[in-house]
Every structure is written in C-alpha cells, then in structure tokens.
Image (tube, rainbow, N blue to C red):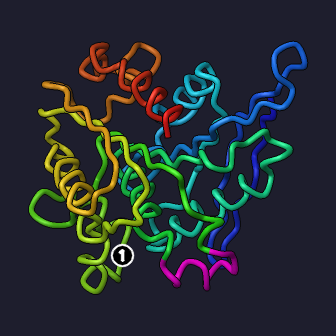
C-alpha cells in the first residue's frame, strides 16, 4: 500500500490528503487500474470527523478500490477554499494515475454531511471558470466521474443545516448563501450520483437528499438513492467500528449495506 500524507496547498490554506493506494500484484494483475475514492468527512465545516475517514477508506480498499481522505480546511476558512482543495486533490490523483494504478475515468468524490456538501459542490461547480482560473488547471482535470453522498448537507433554504453554512461562508453569508444551495446548481453536466440518507435524520433532514435527487432527475443525470426508515445523523458505517463514543444511537447495523451497494454502483459507472 502507498500510504502517504500529502500537502494540498492553495493560496490561503494547507489541507492534508491521506492516501490508501493499493499495490498491484504480479500474481493477480500487475496492470490493474482501480477506481479511486476521495473521502471528505463531515463535521459541519468546523472539523473533519475521524469516524467518516479512515474506516471508510479501509472498507473501500477491501472492495478493491484506492482511497484517499481529504482533511480539508474548515472554519475560519471560507468558500471556496475547501472546494479548491478538493479540486486540487482530484487533479493530483489524475496526475499520479500511472504510479497509483488509477482508472482516470473512475475518480469519485465521496462526502458525509458537510463533507457531502463539499463533494456535491465539486459535482456542480467543476466546470465553472472560477475554479480553473484560481488553480491554473483545466476543468476536465478536476471533474469527478461520480459523487457519493452520505446524508449530505445540500440546501441553504427551509431544510438547511444552518451551522454548516455559517461556518462555510463566514462574512460572505448573505452574499453567497443562495449560490451554495446546491439543488439550484445542478445541470446536465453534474456527474452520476449515489445518495443515501435516513428518514429520521433530524440534524440534516432527508429533504436535502430528495431535493438534490429531484434536481438530478430534472436534468436527466443518473442517480441511485437509498432511504433507510430510521437512524440518527452521522451514522458512517453504522457498525461498532464507527460508533460514536458514548452514543449507542450511532450503532445502526441495518444501514451498513450502503457501502456494498455503493461499491456495485462504482464498478458500474
């Protein structure tokens, strides 16, 4: 395995990309190209959760995928700092495709909660000039081939997780609030999307996923969505490995199959 910690530097920030890149074996297939998943943990743009970081990468590895965890900038950094960092991470993965055995056509941005907002932001903004101009790289280099969203923050409207937007925007809150309501930014250029959520999520209401899915459907973008009937916010894998300390409600094993379904979706992209 190639396990490195790589600085992702923008003009105003320095994020960390943790790689979990599988080695190829001459006994199996020395030239195998693998899907590569960039994981953006949640944390309300205030921190990045350990529960949605390495445990997800390890499970992706177990399914035969490369994985990376992006510890992106959070408050007091404001939009589009973390989006620039994720864009640079995608470009870096494509640049190292040969060395890291990457299938360039299967680079997936995956995010949880506010990290889902970040991954979805790349999905809707990848082709905008402000990113390419700020980073000096082409839009095609930063385009994700799919986005995988776990109980994502999407809307800044009625069903918003207001704390995420306050942390993301800072003093730009009034000026940019509508722009970062992502259901309004979906086009037919948004990549195929996998979504899952729980019906009883009271922190980031399930309407966030429904609104994004509806926008994808209107634009004829391929999607797969799974809604579980119960479960609190921030379940991660829903298993003992990712249970939050002193919170039994984050142990919800009936949602654990989401990652297996996502694996099938990734292989079929």
Identity of the residue drawn at 38% across and 67% down: 168
Res 245 visible: no
- Is residue 210 located in the magenta-colored stretch of the structure? no
Other-residue count near label 1 (Cα within 10 Å), few / some / many at <14 / 14–19 / ≥20: some
Percent across and percent down for residue 46 are 41, 55
Q: Is residue 86 above or below residue 57?
A: below
Q: Is residue 92 left or right of residue 84?
A: right
* SS at circle 1: helix
Residue under numbered circle 1: 170
Query: What is the total number of numbered labels drawn onto the structure image?
Result: 1
Q: Main secondary structure of the magenta part?
A: helix
Say which quadrant the N terminus sits in: top right
Q: Is residue 76 above or below residue 173?
A: above
Q: Is residue 143 above or below residue 52?
A: below
Given residues 161 and 132, the one toward you in this image is: 132
Identity of the residue drawn at 12% across and 56% down: 159
Q: Is residue 158 left or right of residue 141?
A: left
Magenta residues span 128-138
Q: Quadrant of residue 224?
A: top left
Identity of the residue drawn at 22% across and 48% down: 209
Percent across and percent down for residue 147 are 44, 49
Percent across and percent down for residue 132 are 60, 79
Identity of the residue drawn at 30% across and 23% down: 250
Given residues 263 and 246, the one toward you in this image is: 263
Q: Is residue 237 above or below residue 80?
A: above
């Amino acid at each position: 395995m190639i396990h490195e910690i790589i600085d992702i530097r923008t003009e105003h920030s320095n994020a960390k990309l943790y790689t979990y890149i599988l080695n190829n074996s001459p006994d199996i297939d020395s030239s195998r190209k693998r899907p590569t998943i960039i994981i953006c943990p949640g944390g309300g743009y205030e921190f990045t959760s350990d529960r949605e970081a390495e445990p997800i990468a390890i499970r992706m590895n177990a399914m035969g995928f490369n994985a990376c965890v992006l510890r992106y900038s959070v408050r007091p950094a404001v939009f589009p700092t973390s989006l620039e960092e994720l864009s640079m991470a995608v470009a870096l993965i494509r640049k190292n495709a040969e060395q890291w055995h990457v299938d360039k056509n299967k680079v997936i941005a995956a995010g949880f909660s506010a990290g889902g907002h970040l991954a979805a932001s790349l999905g809707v903004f990848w082709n905008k000039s402000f990113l390419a101009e700020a980073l000096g790289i082409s839009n095609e280099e930063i385009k994700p081939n799919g986005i995988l969203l776990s109980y994502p923050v999407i809307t800044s409207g009625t069903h918003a997780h207001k704390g995420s937007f306050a942390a993301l925007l800072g003093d730009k809150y009034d000026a940019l609030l509508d722009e970062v309501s992502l259901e309004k930014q979906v086009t037919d250029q948004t990549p195929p999307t996998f979504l899952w959520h729980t019906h009883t999520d009271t922190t980031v209401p399930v309407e966030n996923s429904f609104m994004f899915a509806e926008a994808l459907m209107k634009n004829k973008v391929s999607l797969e969505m799974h809604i579980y009937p119960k479960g609190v916010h921030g379940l991660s894998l829903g298993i003992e490995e990712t249970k939050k300390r002193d919170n039994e409600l984050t142990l919800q094993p009936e949602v654990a199959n989401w990652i297996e379904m996502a694996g099938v979706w990734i292989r079929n992209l």
